[in-house]
């Protein structure tokens, strides 16, 4: 199965729980998930998170709070009387996390290091909790290439800005490559859930991951710019020819680390603008807010269908 474990399927135990590819963790007295403000001894992680089926991540605490409220309504989940939705990771002052029945809604911050730290801790959290077959979603924003602002993009592949489809991490001073792979079946299922009544397009395409918002994404509006508009357009056109339809800042580690853990994952982003037409995000706030709800709607349809068929 490529994960070096004879007893588990796709890196998971036969019962679907996440197998950790780190022999040290089970030998430790306790595991502190520092950036989540949780620990395997200080909290009963099985009791708190054992029923989790979906881990939904997005950049900002506010968006993930909104998603938590929205999914609560969609799946008809009721909080115990007298309680309100609270941020489980409040005291980390790093990420925010909300739990709505089988759904976790977590913020990941911006960029590769931020999401990579969160993924290590979320994968360990799923392991400690003995959650069965959890699916990870990233619901985010991006810049489109040749697609209108407001278009929803489901990522079929994740590449970096050198068009390499793996996550390269220096470990003990040596570069290690981990393939960035997303679940093909979930991609198809998500696409099938786009409705002809949606007032926007939902497309499947390759996503480029940059470690910078400005120069690495070929913007002309950073603090520095040492290329011409024509150079920028050539760069974006070359990407587009190789199938890239959107640019964001987390897809490669998200795809690679979930795949390495044997966890199924998918990425749904809304394009805030078409980068062939501009660089500045100048769309009014209300319009942006409506755009940001679009990936949430698609993922909510997926979750609802899953829970109905259970
Ligand atoms: C999309 O939006 C953020 C940058 O504005 C970044 O986190 C991303 O991937
Ligand atoms: N996020 C990005 O990383 N790039 C964009 O152009 C928009 C959102």
Image (cartoon, rainbow, N blue to C red):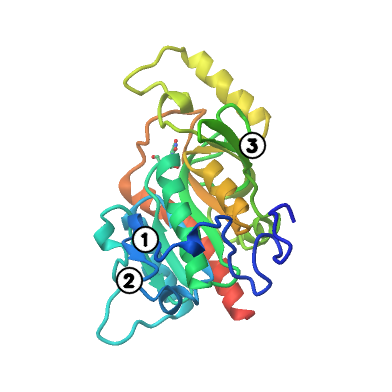
x and y, in percent, of residue 175 in the image:
57, 32
Relative depth, front residue between 275 and 67: 67
Does mark 2's beta carbon lie closer than 8 Å to ligand 1?
no
Q: Is residue 9 left or right of residue 102?
A: right
Please determine whether, in this image, residue 303 is positioned above or below residue 4: below
Please determine whether, in this image, residue 181 is positioned above or below residue 168: below
Q: Which residue, as the protein is rendered here, is positioned at the far bottom? A: 81
Which residue is tagged 1? Answer: 32
Relative depth, front residue between 168 and 8: 8
* Secondary-structure class at tag 1: strand
x and y, in percent, of residue 45 in the image:
42, 73
Quadrant where ligand 1 appears: top left
The nearer-to-camera label among 3 and 1 is 1
Q: Residue visible at 46% across and 26% down?
A: 216
Relative depth, front residue between 189 and 49: 49
Alpha-carbon span between mark 1 and mark 2: 9 Å
> Is residue 153 in view from this perspective?
no
Q: Quadrant of the C terminus?
A: bottom right
Relative depth, front residue between 137 and 146: 137
Identify the mark nearer the N-term, 3 or 1: 1
x and y, in percent, of residue 206 in the image:
63, 40
Which residue is tagged 2? Answer: 42
Question: Do the numbered discs 1 and 2 sit on residues whose CB atoms are within 8 Å?
Answer: yes
* Secondary-structure class at tag 3: loop
Which residue is tagged 3? Answer: 165
Q: Which mark is residue 198?
A: none
Question: Do the numbered discs 3 and 2 sit on residues whose CB atoms are within 8 Å?
Answer: no
Alpha-carbon span between mark 3 and mark 1: 32 Å
């Amino acid at each position: 199965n490529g994960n070096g474990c004879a007893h588990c399927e796709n890196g998971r135990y036969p019962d679907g729980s996440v197998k950790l590819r780190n022999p040290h963790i089970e030998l430790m007295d306790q595991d502190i998930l520092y950036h989540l403000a949780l620990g395997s001894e200080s909290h009963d992680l099985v009791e708190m998170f054992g029923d989790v089926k979906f881990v939904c991540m997005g950049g900002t605490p506010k968006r993930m709070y909104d998603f938590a409220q929205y999914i609560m309504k969609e799946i008809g989940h009721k909080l115990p009387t007298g309680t309100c939705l609270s941020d489980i990771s409040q005291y980390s002052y790093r990420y925010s996390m909300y739990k709505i029945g089988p759904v976790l809604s977590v913020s990941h911050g911006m960029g590769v290091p931020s999401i990579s730290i969160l993924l290590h801790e979320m994968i360990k959290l799923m392991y400690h909790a003995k959650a069965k077959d959890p699916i990870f979603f990233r619901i985010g924003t991006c810049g489109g290439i040749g697609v209108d602002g407001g278009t929803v993009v489901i990522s079929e592949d994740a590449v970096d800005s050198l068009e390499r489809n793996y996550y390269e991490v220096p470990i003990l001073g040596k570069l290690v490559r981990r393939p960035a792979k997303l679940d093909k079946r979930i991609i198809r299922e998500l696409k099938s859930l786009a409705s002809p009544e949606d007032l926007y397009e939902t497309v499947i395409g390759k996503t480029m991951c940059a470690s910078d918002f400005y120069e690495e994404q070929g913007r002309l509006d950073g603090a520095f710019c040492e290329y011409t508009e024509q150079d920028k357009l050539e760069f974006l056109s070359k990407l587009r020819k190789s199938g890239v339809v959107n640019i964001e800042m987390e897809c490669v580690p998200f795809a690679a680390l979930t795949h390495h853990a044997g966890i199924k994952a998918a990425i749904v982003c809304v394009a805030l603008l078409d980068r062939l037409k501009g660089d500045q995000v100048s769309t009014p706030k209300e319009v942006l807010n409506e755009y940001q709800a679009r990936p949430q709607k698609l993922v909510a349809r997926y979750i609802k269908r899953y829970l109905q068929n259970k």
